[in-house]
Image (cartoon, rainbow, N blue to C red):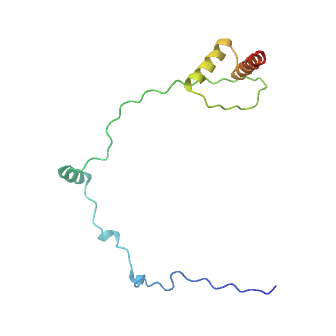
Amino acid sequence: MPSQTKPERTDPLGKLDLGGLDDFRPTPRAAQQPKPPVEAIRAVSEAEGFPSRQSAPREKVKATPAKVEQRRYRTGRNKQLSLKVTEETAQRFTRLADEQRLVLGELLERALDAYEEIRKKG
């Protein structure tokens, strides 16, 4: 296989005339104008009708629903099952588990057993 030479890379700024930036120097800090006091800026902006950037005070947002209490049981169930349900369904499911003193997984198992039993009969 014959060796191929790579072409030379083109310099992207090689042919660009930047107008002699070699003499560019930033303005020293001492020569910059000092910032005016905040009070002076506020007075001018209010006189000219500029609105303030500060937001208006907000009304208190309604409290989010109470968090469901953590449930920690050692049951041997080790698979996660994540479902998208409505808020009412989640509350109903949790309420039923609490009333029957069941862990959520056991309530689901019982619900599935009952559903399968109804399907066999119907």
| Residue 49 falls left or right of residue 76 | left
113 or 79, which lies in front? Answer: 113
The residue at the far top in this view is 99
Work out which residue is located at the far front of the displayed protein and give it: 122
Image coords of residue 120 (percent x, y): 78, 18
Q: Is residue 18 left or right of residue 5?
A: left
* Residue 122, picture quadrant: top right
Observer-nearest residue: 107 or 38? Answer: 107
Residue 116 drawn at (x, y percent):
76, 20
The image quadrant where one finds the N terminus is: bottom right
**Left or right side of 39 for 97:** right
Q: Position of residue 102 (x, y in %)?
A: 70, 16
- Please tell me which residue is depicted at 77% across the width and 23% down the height of the picture: 75
Q: Nearer the viewer, residue 66 or 97?
A: 97
Q: Image check: 76 left or right of 10?
A: right
Measuring from the top left, give residue 79's x and y in whole percent: 75, 31
